[in-house]
Image (cartoon, grey):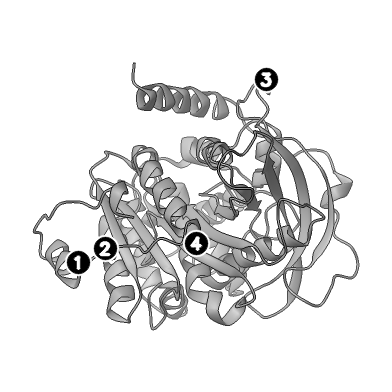
């Protein structure tokens, strides 16, 4: 059996185990109690303590890393400095090539909306479904920081899919990790950004914001997988699908962040669904609300997609679009499957074209893996190759305009491969 098949079977087993039971809110943990006052600067380390990261749901296999959970500051969409949490991982395996392999921030995909769904909590419980990519980074000698987004871990509503909030926390987690008294993570050392799905959007946002928000960081590149760069396209695909919960999360998270009252827009059933989603983790929400039609939740019978095309949501949705007069000032890899069943392929392709048209150095890596989850596994080798090249200061071969334009016109050119990044 090939290594890829072994990994895929392990993932399927882990996902089945992870989703087998509801993740209940955990008892109060003093670490997740925010202090009354926090430092005024974003990216400041507030506190840290040893933690655990298990790569299996039975908590039998600890990750090969020194694990510390951290609390640090970031900037919310309104400009306020707030506390958030995360996890810093330092490989324990000997490093055979270079003493410093760099620091990678990994922005996780959708976890859910409840505070108990925070990646730092999921990792400690052996329930983080993206542990394979994280351990792959550790196996290659990288230091890793995994931030909890705003509203995960600490109190408050998770600002799911809020572009600025997600981008800020990704960048600030790098700053905070470099503040740890860790000889393997120098304060001015090289860093990189990676993420898939929601995490791909967070990574793309961080890449766009870096040169203005955190120019003090030495960011070598960004891996942006299955980026939900255009929420109007994503909403159409999710409504009535097995992944309806993601659309519900976006409605709840963005409404909270932009202070929109959903009460007048939803019927009694819709209000109940929104309240339930705000407290659930992903697997419970997927099981409970698969194939839900959003028109059954609204006060006037319109779909959520229709609501998003009208104010006040039209402006909110427009504000989340990536590549809108913004592009990364570092080299960026955008990966996407043509057969993605959660985030439309056009989201990634169009984002790469928008970035390239503004002068960004971007490479679009296309695959044909069926389903969103399988595409993540397929993209790993290209992501690892890209990161290796960036930390080695090798030039990336960007896609040409002809490649991106041909994809838009439906013509297939050879897909980008890991050898070229």
In front of the other: 84 or 91: 91
Position of residue 156 measured from the top left corner of the image (x, y, whole percent): 72, 60
Q: From the image, tell me which residue sits under label 4.
A: 203
Query: Residue 127 at what x, y percent from top left?
Result: 61, 33
Give me the disc on residue 404: 1
Q: Which mark is residue 60?
A: 3
Image quadrant where one finds the N terminus: top left
Number of numbered callouts drawn: 4
Instruction: Give SS at disc 2.
Output: helix
Q: Marks 4 and 1, how far apart in space? A: 21 Å
Vertical relation: 75 (above or below) 227: below
Q: CA distance from mark 3 to mark 4?
A: 31 Å
* Labelled disc at residue 362: none
Task: Give the residue displayed 55% in from the left and 74% down from the top.
Answer: 210
Q: Which is more toward the observer, 144 or 266?
A: 144
Above or below — where is 231 with respect to 310? Answer: above
Please, is residue 356 above or below residue 198 in the view?
below
Tell me which label, 3 or 1, sits earlier in the chain: 3
Which residue is label 2 attached to? 349
Indicate which disc, 3 or 4, sits on the residue closer to the N terminus.
Answer: 3
Q: In the rendered view of the protein, which quadrant contains the C terminus? A: bottom left
**Residue 37 position (above or below residue 58):** below
Residue name at image x 85 percent, y 49 percent: 31
């Amino acid at each position: 059996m090939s290594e890829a098949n072994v990994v895929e079977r392990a993932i399927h087993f882990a996902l089945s185990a992870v989703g087998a039971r509801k993740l209940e809110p955990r008892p109060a943990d003093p670490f997740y109690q925010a202090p009354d006052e926090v430092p005024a600067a974003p990216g400041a380390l507030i506190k840290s303590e040893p933690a655990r990261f298990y790569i299996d749901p039975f908590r039998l296999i600890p990750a090969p890393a020194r694990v510390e959970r951290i609390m640090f500051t970031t900037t919310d969409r309104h400009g306020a400095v707030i506390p958030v949490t995360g996890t810093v991982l330092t490989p324990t395996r000997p490093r055979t090539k270079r003493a410093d392999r760099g620091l990678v921030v990994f922005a996780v995909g959708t976890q859910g909306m409840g505070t108990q769904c925070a990646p730092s909590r999921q990792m400690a419980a052996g329930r983080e479904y993206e542990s394979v990519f994280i351990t792959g980074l550790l196996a290659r000698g990288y230091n890793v920081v995994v931030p909890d987004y705003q509203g995960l871990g600490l109190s408050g509503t998770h600002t799911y899919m809020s572009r600025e909030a997600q981008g800020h926390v990704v960048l600030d987690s790098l700053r905070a990790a470099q503040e740890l008294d860790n000889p393997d993570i120098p304060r001015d050392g090289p860093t990189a950004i990676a993420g898939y799905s929601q995490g791909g959007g967070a990574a793309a946002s961080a890449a766009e914001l870096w040169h203005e928000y955190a120019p003090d960081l030495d960011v070598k590149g960004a891996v942006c997988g299955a980026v939900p760069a255009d929420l109007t396209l994503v909403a159409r695909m999710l409504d009535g699908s097995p992944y309806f919960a993601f659309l519900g999360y976006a409605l709840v998270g963005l409404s909270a962040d932009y202070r929109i009252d959903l009460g007048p827009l939803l019927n009694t059933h819709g209000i109940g669904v929104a309240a339930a989603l705000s407290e659930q983790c992903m697997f419970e929400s997927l099981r409970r609300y698969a194939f839900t039609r959003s028109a059954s939740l609204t006060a006037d019978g319109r779909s959520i997609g229709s609501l998003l095309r009208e104010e006040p949501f039209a402006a909110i949705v427009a504000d989340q679009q990536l590549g809108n007069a913004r592009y990364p000032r570092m080299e960026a890899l955008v990966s996407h499957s043509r057969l993605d069943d959660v985030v439309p392929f056009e989201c990634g392709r169009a984002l790469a074209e928008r970035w390239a048209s503004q002068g960004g150095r971007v490479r679009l890596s296309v695959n044909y893996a069926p389903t969103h989850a399988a595409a993540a596994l397929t993209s790993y080798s290209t992501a690892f190759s890209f990161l290796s090249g960036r930390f080695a200061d090798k030039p990336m071969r960007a896609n040409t305009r002809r490649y991106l334009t041909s994809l838009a016109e439906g013509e297939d050119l050879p897909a980008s491969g890991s050898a070229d990044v």
